[in-house]
Structures are given as structure tokens and as C-alpha cells.
Amino acid sequence: MNAKQVVEDLNRRFPGEPAYIQAVSQVLGSIEETYNEYPAFEATNLVERLCIPDRVISFRVTWTDDAGRVRTNFGYRVQHNNVLGPYKGGIRFHESVNLGILKFLAFEQTFKNSLTTLPMGGAKGGSDFSPRGKSSAEVMRFCQAFMSELYRHIGPDEDVPAGDIGVGGREVAYMFGWYKRLTHQWGGVLTGKGLEFGGSLIRPEATGYGNVYFLQNMLATRGEDLAGKTVLVSGAGNVAQYTIEKCIELGAKVVTCSDSDGYIYDPDGIDREKLNFIMRLKNEERGRISEYAEEYGVKYVGGGAKPWFEKADIALPSATQNEINEEAAKALVKNGVIAVSEGANMPSTPEAIKVFQAAKLLYSPGKAANAGGVAVSGLEMSQNSERLSWTREEVDARLHGIMNNIHENCVNHGTEADGYINYVKGANIAGFLKVAKAMMAQGIY
Ligand code: NDP
Ligand code: 2IT
């Protein structure tokens, strides 16, 4: 395989999907050498079979708003690869969603799920519908309309969706209710369900907690820990909130969080009470992060500004893709940041990653660092299958074990000659090898 050539070819065949090409290019760049050690891979064109999704389902979603206007959005499910288990991955509702973004997320999900060691394939779905500014009744009608098409393509052994940007507990519950009504099956389809109806303890916390567990492992390789460190977090949604919660618990000081309108900077740090304010603001009142600045009298920078130019020791991007560009990465390095661990999917541009790696920062890609969310989704599936619920301690201990194991796998596959741990290389090779070997075993199709 010549990675550059494969990427050029995919770019020609799938024009207008830059995020997908970016994700593929990152992975192929790091696995090229390993891939070429197995001639059987090239002999069966494994690379294209791996990069092109198994199936893309596309549909129109029609719903009626509170004013009685009939509205349309599009819906997609990208089922990327199911050699390791049923398709698995979140659903994103955001106005920026397009096919290229969902293809990048489904591709990444395949390697991430492989890293968890649980039997899950990779998928992603979504719509250009945004819950922002919509009433709960409108969100419910949209979720029902979306599921009216999607239900034909999912099932406990077929495809198990979950949340992502714009899809939290409320949206998952509406979709689960409608799936059940249409199929007459309880099934456990969709993870991230409410605790009353099959959800797992620790699932809401899992992505943020998991990222911090991974970060602790990274810091330990340099004899450091989190206590006393100053942390920049972006986002104020599910991942950001529980990242902040775990940082507070471990004695770090989180000084920023953000939404798509801007960020707040709180030099005293976000404490438990202030985090409760954020959780109420975002999860119940569905307000804007600028209200935090009004409440606590701290700095707010609007205009979609990002927090990366503030001084800190650690950065935990937890909002969206490509939110750290080269300029932001240089500012982080200049300000003395020692670690960047990705709660979001692909938040750093390729240029930013180069800056981190050139500076020998501890830098972990989302597919390793944020795998805790889907890992606990996998544990929710296990609990649903055995019709049992595990305790908070048991799920948290398993999550912790999975994150430690992913870290170890990255070290094993990513340590370079000079001792620098290249987590991008480590995660990509470890995730890839398992999927590739399973594909080879299952024949050519
Ligand atoms: P939420 O919808 O709960 O929160 C997303 C946050 O990011 C919000 O504060 C949102 O602001 C902000 N945001 C979204 N889009 C943009 C944008 N284009 N520019 C700036 N800010 C933006 O989503 P999650 O917390 O679940 O997801 C955050 C990231 O983590 C995503 O990359 C997701 O793919 C990834 N992830 C999520 C997992 C999960 O279990 N939920 C698991 C693994 C990864 P606003 O409210 O203004 O839109
Ligand atoms: O990106 C992700 O890993 C998620 N949004 C979670 C997917 C899941 O199935 O829990």
C-alpha cells in the first residue's frame, strides 16, 4: 500500500468529504509500514475494503414544528464495519452534519471500538437537525420521525446507536421509545438509556472520566500527576461536564469551558458548585455559557472564540472536530502545556498534531482517549443481555481497566526509538491490526 496514493484516490472518488479524507489520511499514514509487513493484506485490497463503509443509509426526515410548519431534514446511518461485532456508534444532531463528517466518525469509531476489546463494529449516524432553540415537543417529534426510518436498519445484533453532539439522555429516550413502539421489541437497542429502563450507571460520565483516566496514565509516564495542574477544557456538554467533574475530584483546576458562541475563563477554577450551575444551565435550562460569566463575574470571550490561548498545563478538547488549529497548538506549546488528551473526535487538525509531536508533548488522539464512552456503552449492552444491572463501582472499575489497557496498547505499538510515545501511531496500529486480522479471517466480501 502506498498511503498517499490511496488517499488521493479516495479524495477523487469522494469529493467534498474533507473530514473523511483527513481521518483516513491520518490512519493510513501511521499504519502503512505495519500493513506492508503482511503481503496478504495488499493481495486482497484490504485497505479499500477497510476505508469504504460497508453501507450508507440515507433518508428524509419530515416533522412538524410547534407553529404547525412542516419541516424536512436529512438523516444518515453510516455502517462502517462489523467484523468485530454489531455496528456501534453515536448519533449526532447538529446543523453542521453532512455525509463526510459522519463517514469520518464511523471510520474512527471502527478503530476506537476495536481498542476497547469489546465486541463492537463501527458506525455513526445523524442529521442536520439541531435541538438548539427547539421545544422538547419538537425534539420528540423529530426523534420519532428520525427513528421511523432508522428502525429498519438497527437491532441488538445488527446496529446499536447511542448519543453524540446534540443527542443526550432526552433524545436517546425519545428514540428508544419510538423504536420499541414500532418493533414491539425492548431489545436494548440504543445505549445511553435512562437508568430506569436499562441504562448503565457511569455511562453519562464515561467519556469524560475515561479521558481523565487515560490522561493520568500519560502523565505517569513522565512521573507527573493531575493534582495542582491547571486545565483548559472546551465544550460544556456531556463530555466536558464529566471531564471537569473528574478533574475537580483529582485536585486539578479547570479554568475554561465553552460552547459554540464563546468561552469563559475562571481564574479561581470551576468548583463543584459552579459545575452544578453548568449542568443545570446546559442540561435543563439549555442556556448559553455566557450566563456563567454573568453569574460569577468572570471573563467571557464571544464570537466563537476558543480557550486555547489561555495559560495552563493541560488541554482537554471536548467540543468538536478541528477545534485546535496550528496557531492554537503553537500557543499551547508556547504557554507550557505538557499534555493534550482528546475528549472530542479529531479536535486537532493534522498541522496541530505535528506541532504537538514536534514539541514531544504527551498527545493522545480521541480514538484512544475518548473510548471510555463507547466502552461503557458496550457494558450497557452486556448488562441488557444478561438482564442485570451492575453497580457504579463495578462499571467504573471496568472502565478504568479498559482505559489502562488502551494506554498500554498505545505504548506497546507507539513507542519510538528515542522513547517518545507516539499515541497516534500506537492507537492506529493496535486498532487496525485487530480489525484487519478479523477481516482476513472472514473472507473476501
Ligand atoms: P454535547 O452536544 O453534549 O456537547 C457539545 C459541546 O460542544 C457543546 O458545548 C457545544 O456547544 C459544543 N460544540 C458543538 N459543536 C461545536 C462547534 N461546531 N463549534 C464549537 N463548539 C461546538 O456533545 P458531547 O459532549 O457528547 O460531544 C462532544 C465531543 O465528544 C464530540 O466531538 C463527540 O463526537 C465526542 N464524543 C462524545 C462521546 C459521548 O459519549 N457523548 C463519546 C466520545 C466522543 P453548543 O451547545 O453551542 O452547540
Ligand atoms: O464517539 C463516540 O464514541 C460516541 N459518541 C459514543 C458512541 C457509543 O456508541 O456509545
Image (spheres, rainbow, N blue to C red):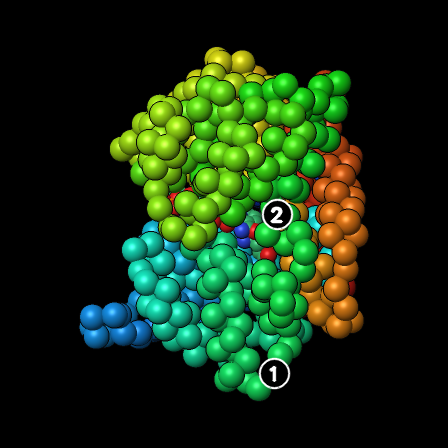
User: Looking at the image, which is closer to me, 172 or 13?
Assistant: 172
Q: Which quadrant holds the C terminus? A: bottom right
**Which residue position holds label 2?**
205
Residue type at mark 1 is Gln
Residue at 51% x, 47% y is 238
**Which residue position holds label 1?**
185
Q: Does the rendering let one see residue 99?
A: no
Contact, mark 2 vs mark 1 (Cβ under 8 Å):
no
Rendered view: 162 above or below 270: below
Work out how far the residue at label 2 is from the one at label 1, CA to CA, in angstroms: 27 Å
Mark 2: secondary structure:
helix
Image x and y of residue 84, in percent: 70, 62
Disc 2 or 1, which lies upstream in sequence? Answer: 1
Image x and y of residue 260, in percent: 35, 41
Residue at 65% x, 25% y is 251
Image x and y of residue 340, in percent: 57, 28
Residue type at mark 2 is Glu
